[in-house]
Amino acid sequence: MSDLSKVPQFNRLFRLQFEPAQDSFVLLFPEGMVKLNPSAGAILEQVDGDSSVAGIINKLQSKFPEAGDLTPDVCDFLITAEEKKWIYYA
Amino acid sequence: MRDSTLVNAGPPFWLLAELTYDCPLHCPYCSNPTDMGDRKDEIDTQAWRDVMTQARKMGAVQLGFSGGEPLLRKDLEELVAHGRQLGFYTNLITSGIGLTSKRIAKLKEAGLDHIQISFQGADPEVNDAIAGRGKAYQQKFEMAQQVKAQGYPMVLNFVISKQNIEQIPQILDLATELEADYVELATAQYYGWAYHNRDHLLPSKAALDKAEQQVNEYRANQNGQGPQFIFVTPDYYEDRPKACMNGWASTFLTVTPDGSALPCHSAKLLPLEFPNVKDKTIEEIWQQDFSFNRFRGDSWMKEPCSSCSEKADDFGGCRCQAYMMTGDMENTDPVCAKSPHKHLIKDAIAKAEHPDTPLLYRDNSKDIVRVKL
């Protein structure tokens, strides 16, 4: 993905939720659940239908200042998330 | 019980609330028990609220409202609202009979996340013959349109049997026309009424292969568009058993209309005493009850399971199937090619080519209940 101004949104089949019992974010969908690893959870937590990819990266950079440039990781993950139809771009 | 894997069983991620066994349809493939009990024994609204609250506290996250027909419970909206407030993903599993656009809207307001509608066939003739009710197809069709129009994710469930397997191409078209998100093409599993009617339901291997090929061809032309089709073949034609319920009491908790707690919705047929939510907490049931620990781990297994290298993959298969077909719930699921009872499955397949008992429609009549099992 090259265009960082695009705004990702959740596909309405999926609901993101933090589950204390699993100490992780999960994606819930009809009769199913995907347990997310910490970085996937942190990225999807920023998907709010308003923030662009660039905005999401900025927020994550300030949240994890020691992490180095997060752009490639975030972009790679968002491609996967789009392929899995968790998110789409309006 | 006997081995260390039992300590700290993970949470029951799935809570299936079978609100009532009552149903306006009479499908002969129904997996409900043939003795459906009495509506006056159903647990009340407060009991269901307590069950949900307790299960959610343990980490349950998926909540299915099922039956019978859950729409027959007048407190459904209240229960959905409670479940959603607790943070459950709420699923309504319905025949569509009794649904109205007004009720779909009310359920949405209550926070319902998803609606699954069952279909029995791809046209009124086949659908309503299997359902045992006139105008069922038309009602389902209209309600499926409404469910989508009101913005729900929608799953359509087609139970596939000898009676409708020739309709696969039309079924695929119907699901696409209705803009379903997921479509389960699930061959009937032979429990409850379906076990009784197995000879009339179990499709031949040739018919199944053809159906699967039709689904694959359809998928190949979808180009990533339209419904996602999930084709479930019957385990009778497999060489290894299914990993039933993802392992006994590992993931699923079913509560039946009268408050019985089960590790799967068929388990009541086993010669085990199951606890009731009126007498015990969900945590006591899940962590400590004898019946829930009965088939956890592998120390209960007999040969050929106990020394099998695949025992951690399929847990010996389905306890209900082992019991129904071999008379011993500790036996290897007879679907397994290693089972000394495999011939029972082969006999059942052969017998299904020439049914010699009448098809029995699901009914509340006690006379029919007495015929059973």
Image (tube, coloured by chain):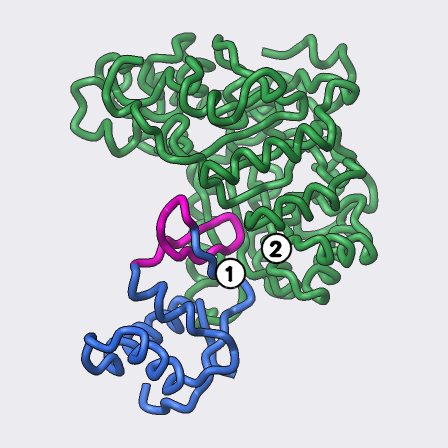
Q: Determine which residue is flagged by label 1.
A: A15
Q: Work out whether residue B143 or residue B167 is closer to the camera in this orientation and state it.
A: B143
Question: What's the distance in space between the residues labelled 1 and 2, CA to CA?
Answer: 9 Å
The stretch of residues the image draws in magenta is A20-37
Q: Name the spot of residue B103 as percent of width and height, x first.
A: 80, 52
Q: Which amino acid does label 1 sit on?
A: Arg
Q: Which amino acid does label 2 sit on?
A: Asp
Q: Determine which residue is flagged by label 2.
A: B113
Give the quadrant of residue B19.
top right
Relative to B247, does residue B89 appear above or below in the rendering? below
Q: Name the spot of residue B203 as percent of width and height, x first.
A: 50, 35
Q: Spot the blue chain and give its letter.
A: A
Q: How many marks?
A: 2
Let me know if marks 1 and 2 both belong to one chain. no
Residue B356 belongs to the span the image colors magenta? no
Relative to B273, does residue B199 appear above or below in the rendering? below
The disc numbered 1 marks a residue on which chain?
A
Residue A29 belongs to the span the image colors magenta? yes
Q: Residue at horizontal 78%, vertical 45%?
A: B136
Residue B343 in the figure: left or right of residue B60: left
Secondary structure state at the residue bearing disc 2: loop
Q: How crowded is mark 2: few (under 14 residues within 10 Å), some or many (20 or more)?
A: many
Residue B33 in the figure: left or right of residue A47: right
Q: Name the spot of residue B64 as percent of width and height, x first.
A: 59, 41
Q: Spot the green chain and give its letter.
A: B
The disc numbered 2 marks a residue on which chain?
B
